[in-house]
Amino acid sequence: QVQLVESGGGLVQAGGSLRLSCAASGGIFSINDMGWYRQAPGKQRELVATITSGGSTNYADSVEGRFTISRDNAKNTVYLQMNSLKPEDTAVYYCNAAVVVSIYIYDYWGQGTPVTVSS
């Protein structure tokens, strides 16, 4: 059974930094795109950043220049370095991965890790 386990969330003051990690495990042949999404209270889940297996990245306009997504394919792990954090970055952050299992591709989500940015 494939699992995505996130870590690194917490409480930080505005202007500070956090680094999120998400490790995938369990019967994985390979992983295509990986990404981070977030959901603030009362709002819909939104894309933060994605990265392909080849390392091409895409960012939401709201985090461009402040956040950096990266991955370690050997460890099936994706990271999100968040700098210059703002109170509006407060949300639960979810990891997503398109996992190749046998001849199929499945979409998996982590359990979410909360990030709170105080002003």
Image (spheres, helix red, strand yellow):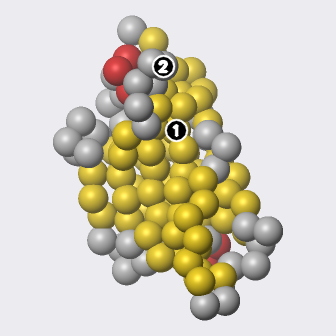
Dot 1 amino acid type:
Tyr
Where residue 11 appears, as percent x and y from the top left, is: 56, 21
What separation in Å lies between label 1 and label 2 (alpha carbons)?
12 Å
Callout 2 crowding tier (Cα within 10 Å): few <14, some 14–19, many ≥20 = few
Secondary structure at badge 1 equals: strand
Residue at (73% x, 61% y) in the render:
3
Q: Residue at x 26, y 45 (%)?
A: 60
Seen in the picture, residue 80 relative to 117 is either above or below; the reply is below
Identify the residue under disc 1.
93
Which of the labelled discs sits on residue 108, or is there none? none
Asked which quadrant contains residue 1, the reply is bottom right
Q: Secondary structure at mark 2?
A: loop
Foreground label between 1 and 2: 2
Residue sitting at the far bottom: 103
Q: Amino acid at mark 2?
A: Pro
Image location of residue 67, percent across then percent down: 34, 44
Q: Nearer the viewer, residue 80 or 17?
A: 80
Label of residue 41 in the image: 2
Q: Is residue 43 above or below residue 37?
A: above
- Residue 102 at x, y percent in the picture: 67, 89
Image-based side of 12 in relation to 62, left or right: right
State whether residue 38 appears in this view: yes
